[in-house]
């Protein structure tokens, strides 16, 4: 058995120093920041282009709605008129069995002296509106309507067979409205001769 030398220094057994794990990266890098700015910039530019286009064309829907309102009003006005064998001023208008029984048969276009806006001799039949041009738009009394100075309308009335109804007993009414910027809208309707002797 060996005896330890008292002069000898004891050997110290120490561990190797621990390597400290680097802290995790927090935040974003410069490259990530640049990519973020580029992507957001592209999105903002795209939105600005959409808003710019929308604001430039924002008047178009208003013009379109106004033209539609004018066309609907005129079509309703025409369709509410009688569609008779004879002109309603004809003495045989209430009794005629066909246009042959009329002294004044109804034909396309107004009769002499009749106008849309007359208080004494107004249009009294759908056919009277054939070929009518209204420019600028006026009401039934002929008064100009505020804000509609840039609009005009044309009305055509033509015989047209409709779902088994003979062309002599049905009319196609076409209202074409033009507005600012050379925009136009066409609306069509039909009127049948369901009451050929009904006069106002």
Image: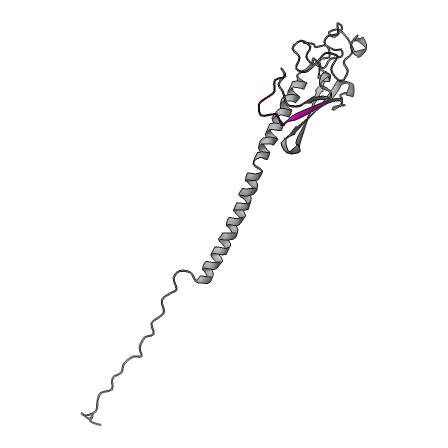
Say which quarter of the image contains residue 138.
top right
For image coordinates 47% across by 59% down, the residue present is 34
**Where does residue 142 sit, x and y in percent of width and height?**
63, 17
**Where does residue 120 sit, x and y in percent of width and height?**
67, 9
The front one of 101 and 72 is 72
Single out the residue that lies furthest toward the right. Answer: 100
Residue 36 as seen in the image, left or right of residue 139: left
- The segment highlighted magenta reads 144-156
Q: Is residue 150 magenta?
A: yes
Name the quarter where the C terminus is drawn: top right
Residue 191 as seen in the image, left or right of residue 27: right
Name the quarter where the N terminus is drawn: bottom left
Say which quarter of the image contains residue 174.
top right
Callout count: 0
Q: Is residue 94 magenta?
A: no
For image coordinates 42% across by 60% down, the residue present is 28
For image coordinates 47% across by 55% down, the residue present is 37
Residue 51 as seen in the image, left or right of residue 92: left
Q: Is residue 9 above or below residue 27?
A: below
């Amino acid at each position: 058995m060996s005896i330890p030398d008292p002069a000898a220094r004891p050997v110290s057994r120490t561990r190797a120093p621990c390597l400290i794990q680097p802290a995790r990266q927090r935040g974003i890098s410069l490259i990530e920041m640049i990519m973020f700015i580029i992507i957001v910039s592209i999105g903002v530019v795209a939105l600005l282009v959409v808003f710019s286009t929308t604001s430039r064309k924002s008047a178009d829907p208003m013009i379109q709605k106004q033209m539609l309102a004018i066309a609907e009003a005129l079509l309703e006005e025409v369709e509410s008129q009688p569609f008779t064998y004879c002109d309603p001023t004809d003495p045989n208008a209430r009794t005629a069995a066909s246009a042959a029984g009329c002294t004044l048969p109804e034909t396309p276009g107004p009769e002499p002296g009749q106008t849309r806006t007359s208080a004494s001799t107004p249009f009294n039949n759908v056919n009277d509106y054939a070929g009518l041009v209204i420019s600028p738009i006026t009401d039934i009394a002929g008064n100009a309507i505020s804000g509609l100075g840039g609009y005009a309308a044309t009305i055509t009335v033509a015989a047209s067979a409709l779902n088994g109804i003979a062309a002599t007993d049905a009319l196609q009414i076409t209202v074409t409205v033009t507005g600012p910027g050379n925009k136009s809208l066409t609306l069509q309707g039909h009127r049948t001769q369901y009451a050929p002797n009904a006069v106002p």
